[in-house]
Amino acid sequence: MASMAFRYSDPSDARRSGSRYPIVAELHYRITRKHAEVETGRGRTLNISSSGILIETDHALPPGLRVDLSIVWPVRLNNVTPLQLCVKARTIRTEGRRTALKIFRHEFRTRPPLQAVGAEASPIRQSLPDISQLQTRLNASFEEVSRMAGGRLGGEARAALRGVVEDYRTKLNRLAITLPR
């Protein structure tokens, strides 16, 4: 799949109460049943909100499946470190090759620059960077996303993005307390 850019469009969908952000990014998915891998594949995101995601894959994913997604995040931390968004979700609706998923858990992880989307990085093998560095990178990423939007982020979208940044800042602070020094 060709490299996909960070794109903005008009996310007007009346079925949702929350805002959807039209982020197009490559992804790898893994379907599991009773903790056993059933199927893997590739696709792309079409839009994302805090509780749901719309993806497009080579074939339809039926409703009711547990899916793990690894999404190549289009913004790098501090313009250097590649990120992936790891999502645990359940399929809720399919329309052709598009599937809507309800997000149950998500987290951002760093990934080596040459790591394939589908390769799973063990959290144990990842080195733990300094929390203050992560906080600095988080702030820089927020500013970079704002610049990339080129003024197209309205007040609500900017507030939602700031909310995500604050949520991760809180998580980083909790992590700083629990990590051994």
Image (cartoon, helix red, strand yellow):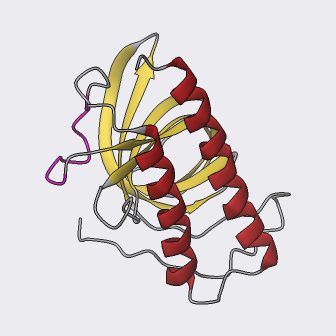
Q: Where is residue 53 in the image (x, y as percent from the top left)?
A: 59, 52
The image quadrant of residue 110 is: top left
**Residue at position x 77%, y 66% in the image:** 159
Q: Which residue is at the far bottom?
A: 151
Q: Where is residue 63 in the image (x, y as percent from the top left)?
A: 60, 36
The image quadrant of residue 36 is: top left
Nearer to me, 141 or 54? 141
Q: Height in image: 171 above or below 73? A: above
Nearer to me, 121 or 59? 121
Residue 35: tell me if it is visible. Answer: yes
Left or right: residue 56 compared with residue 146: left
Is 116 magenta? The answer is yes
Residue 97: tell me if it is visible. Answer: no
**Residue at position x 47%, y 45% in the image:** 132
Q: How many marks?
A: 0
Nearer to me, 152 or 52? 152
Q: Height in image: 172 above or below 81? A: above
**Residue at position x 49%, y 78% in the image:** 7
The image quadrant of residue 8 is: bottom right
Characterize the magenta stretch by its predominant secondary structure.
loop
The stretch in magenta equals 113-121
Q: Which corner quadrant holds the C terminus?
A: top left
Q: Position of residue 94 (x, y in %)?
A: 59, 49
**Residue at position x 30%, y 35% in the image:** 40
Left or right: residue 167 compared with residue 121: right
Q: Position of residue 139 (x, y in %)?
A: 54, 61
Left or right: residue 72 compared with residue 98: left
